[in-house]
Image (cartoon, rainbow, N blue to C red):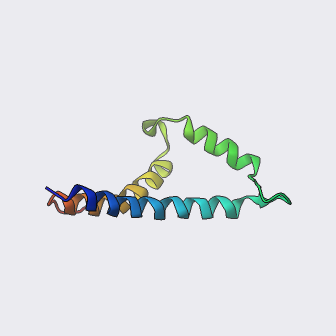
Amino acid sequence: MPDDQALLEELAAIEHERWSHWQRFMHEKGRRQPDGSLLIPSDLVEKWDRLINTPYAQLTDKERESDREQVLRYLPVVAKAYGKLTP
């Protein structure tokens, strides 16, 4: 059984990296306003609203692949912690 605190910290570091990557992506897609806020293009808001409201099973394979790529960041750590081989 893994050290729960060490596993938590390792997964939290991966989550922060994932979140930072997403925020950089969003900031690059937005337009900085004079007050420092970001204006996100309406087509992206529409797309993300649709994705937010779509269950995973109803996403396209391409959209699901994006989620799988994110899980692959975590899976090796979890598999190692529980003594299993990674895919």
Above/below status of 69 relative to 48: below
Viewer-proximal residue among 42 and 4: 4
**x, y percent for residue 33:** 83, 58
On-image quarter of the N terminus: bottom left
Residue at horizontal 56 percent and vertical 39 percent from the top: 52
Residue at horizontal 44 percent and vertical 53 percent from the top: 65
Viewer-proximal residue among 72 and 65: 72
Residue 6 falls in which quadrant of the image?
A: bottom left
Residue 44 falls left or right of residue 65: right
Residue 47 falls left or right of residue 53: right
**x, y percent for residue 9:** 34, 61
Viewer-proximal residue among 15 and 6: 6
Residue 17 falls left or right of residue 11: right
Residue at horizontal 20 percent and vertical 63 percent from the top: 80
Residue at horizontal 40 percent and vertical 63 percent from the top: 14
The mark tally for this picture is 0
Residue 85 falls in which quadrant of the image?
A: bottom left
Residue 37 falls in which quadrant of the image?
A: bottom right
On-image quarter of the C terminus: bottom left
